[in-house]
Image (tube, grey):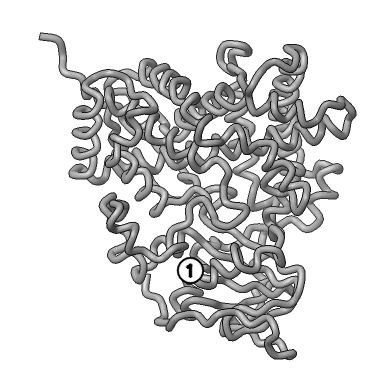
Amino acid sequence: MATAARNSVPKSNVSGPAAYRYPPGLERNLLWFAFRKLRPANPILLFQQLAEKYGDIAHYKIGWHHIVFLNHPDYIREILVVQNENFIKERTVQRTKMLLGEGMITAEGAQHRTQRQVAQPAFHRQRIPEYAGTMVQEAIRVRDRWRAGEQRDIAIDMMHLTLNVVAQTLFATDLGRESGDEVDELASAVNRIMGLYNFLVMLPAAEWLVHMRPPGLAAFVRARKRIDAVVYRMIAAHRQRGPHGSSLLDMMLAASPGQTPASEQSLRDQVITIFLAGSETVANCLSWTWYLLSQNPDCERRFHDEIDRELQGRVPTFDDVPRLRYVEMVLAESLRIYPPAWAMGRYARADFQLGEFFLPAKTTVLMSQYITHRDPRFFPDPLRFDPERFTPEAMSRRTKLTYFPFGAGVRQCIGESFACMEGVLLLATIAQKWKLRLVPGHPVEPEPLITLRPKYGMRMQVESRERPAS
């Protein structure tokens, strides 16, 4: 992707001019396509066009809403770190409250800080090693169900795997053994909601219309009820066990001792947010990683060689994670090319300065990991899969926030360390036994929903890496 050249971004000056000054950008108002069949144009294509034509910062309008798109680490840092207090989550994230309620992703201010403080011990570096054994055992259960030569939708398999991992590690709940089909129920409900995402984002007054259940929203309500049923069962089971556990759900219960409808709703919102965010993003990352490995045989060979050399046939443990350095680099490069969190946005509370531009309150600021991660200024030959971009030396030379798959600032993803360890362990465990090949003719296209999903799933053929017994 070619981008317009820019010099170093000027530092903000919040005492700037009184008159608003907007960045260059599209003259036409984009309201016409925002409501066309209630489906927006592919936002990735729009962002690519803005970056190619206007470079680091561009302005456009949808109706009366001013929107600024950023594609430079200095601008991105200004919004996410330096001026963070002036911004809240923007409209599309607010729409996810229809599913997530007031969880950690959508909550603001003191409510967000309180939720993060409650959850923080579960993600502390001293606690993370405790989860490794469960992650590996779940990966073994998946790999042992596969058979050589069969074709599988790896996107579905990875979703089931990560749902089980999050349920067991963070919420001390075994979805598979306690209720049999709960994982299928959850995955099906999540897939249904994801398929409705663009419709929900663009539908005017969706938060009010949901109570009337017109076509589309009725399906959303049914899927949400299925997810709620699982979450409320988990909460009830933990309450029945008493205050003796140490899982994240136990910590949440301890911080919310009452059992009023309000407290139950708050618990539900917190649990569902971490449960779905923790499974959806990692599942997508793993699906894209298997695909990228299948398309890059030299990298795949190094990946398998390291696993065989370091593990010598035994299952991985937490202590092996630092030794599986190339596996980690493969994961990082996958997150660069296909970041599950593909874009993020903020909504300005007050007027603000951004470089040489002075912008009004209520401006929406958007930035896209997908676009910035593929900018050739920051990653030469950006579409080439090259895990060597993530050697310590290469990372030390790179400007911060040219790579930000987990966000940045005070709202950086709380589960980053958890997700990275999980990705390495699941990949290594499955790859000990299998390699995956994309089914010939299967279309691969990223679909920018809440996360970046493979639009048509990921059909792959399972091939054995084990030598037949002599």
Residue 69 appears in the figure: yes
Determine the residue positioned at 68% across, 53% down. Answer: 93
- Residue at 85% x, 42% y is 211
The x and y percentages for residue 279 are 54, 34
Front residue of this view, candidates 166 and 117: 117
Farthest residue in the left direction? 470
Residue 208: image location, x then y, percent: 85, 49
Q: Quadrant of the N terminus?
A: bottom left
Percent of width and height locating residue 300 = 23, 39
Q: Compared to 302, does 37 lie above or below?
A: below
In the displayed structure, would residue 170 be above or below residue 209? above
Numbered circles on residues, count: 1
Residue 26 x, y percent position in the rendering: 58, 81
Quarter holding the C terminus is: top left
Along the horizontal axis of the image, is 55 left or right of 442?
Answer: right
Apparent side of residue 465 relative to residue 226 in the rendered image (left or right): left
Amino acid type, label 1:
Pro
Q: Quadrant of residue 190?
A: top right
Q: Residue at x 44, y 25 (%)?
A: 132
Near mark 1 (Cα within 10 A), the count class, few <14, some 14-19 or many ≥20, is many
Camera-side residue: 331 or 78? 78
Residue farthest toward the top in the current orientation of the protein: 470
Residue holding disc 1: 73
- Is there any visible trace of residue 215 in the rendered image? no
Q: Is residue 154 left or right of residue 128?
A: left
The residue furthest right is 260
Q: Which secondary structure, mark 1?
A: helix
Q: Is residue 448 left or right of residue 104?
A: left
Q: Residue at x 61, y 19 (%)?
A: 173
Figure quadrant of residue 442? top left
